[in-house]
Image (tube, rainbow, N blue to C red):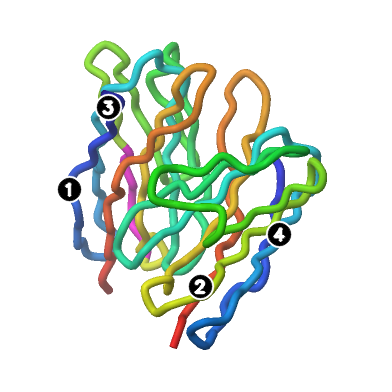
Amino acid sequence: SAVISQKPSRDICQRGTSLTIQCQVDSQVTMMFWYRQQPGQSLTLIATANQGSEATYESGFVIDKFPISRPNLTFSTLTVSNMSPEDSSIYLCSARTGGENYGYTFGSGTRLTVV
Amino acid sequence: KNQVEQSPQSLIILEGKNCTLQCNYTVSPFSNLRWYKQDTGRGPVSLTIMTFSENTKSNGRYTATLDADTKQSSLHITASQLSDSASYICVVAIYGQNFVFGPGTRLSVLP
């Protein structure tokens, strides 16, 4: 299955600033996704990153706050903009791995703390 | 409504003991079911994947079962180790679409 490199693994940021998280997949994948996971909670889908078009956002998430890039089939970025302490969370990217028994492979996560 | 429920919410066991985690789903059309292990602060890692025609799948000390008729799955951990402490997430794939994540079971293995 695909391997995803995600960075940074963690960061501490000042409120009002922005952080860009990168995910690199070792093979071409059609679908990439970005999740947020707040402490003790399960994963919440932020958006689907589409190659060559705008990302598709889930309810409660907007492009101005979480702009996403997907310049090719192996790479995507998520930016957390104008951060506040409420944005402190783990952010995860994942890629849909193809084949008959498709599933998700996840990056190692970015632990973000906003102070 | 497509939903995945897991029980228990959390579990504490002693090292060396066995345990079983449960997953019930109401997802249709069903494609496959995966169990993931997520260490604290890390991304989930796939343990097993099963399609509707499979009822048991093992990966070392982890054994997953699937009953597609009752829409239930279990993950059995044998001879638990301290490193098994993690969240275990049941994820069900909707055929041709996306996934539905369960809330996870938080397992703590104590020495």
Mark nearer the viewer, 4 or 2: 2
- Check disc 2 and report its element: helix, strand or loop: strand
| Whole-number angstrom distance, CA of label 4 to CA of label 1 | 32 Å
Vertical comparison of A14 with A96: above or below:
below
Q: Is residue A46 left or right of residue B22?
A: right
Disc number for residue A5: 4
- Check disc 1 and report its element: helix, strand or loop: loop
Q: Which residue is mark 1?
A: B8
Q: Is residue A38 left or right of residue B58?
A: left
Residue type at the position of mark 2 = Arg
| Whole-number angstrom distance, CA of label 3 to CA of label 2 | 30 Å
Q: Earlier in the sequence, mark 1 or mark 3?
A: 1
| Whole-number angstrom distance, CA of label 4 to CA of label 3 | 31 Å
Residue type at the position of mark 1 = Pro
Vertical comparison of B58 with A59: above or below:
above
Residue density around tag 4, few if under 14, some if 14–19, many if 20 or more, within 10 Å? some
- Check disc 4 and report its element: helix, strand or loop: strand
Q: Are marks 4 and 2 in contact (CB under 8 Å)?
A: no
Q: Which residue is mark 2?
A: A111
Asked whether the residues under marks 4 and 3 belong to the same chain, the reply is no
Q: State the quadrant of the N terminus of chain A.
A: top right
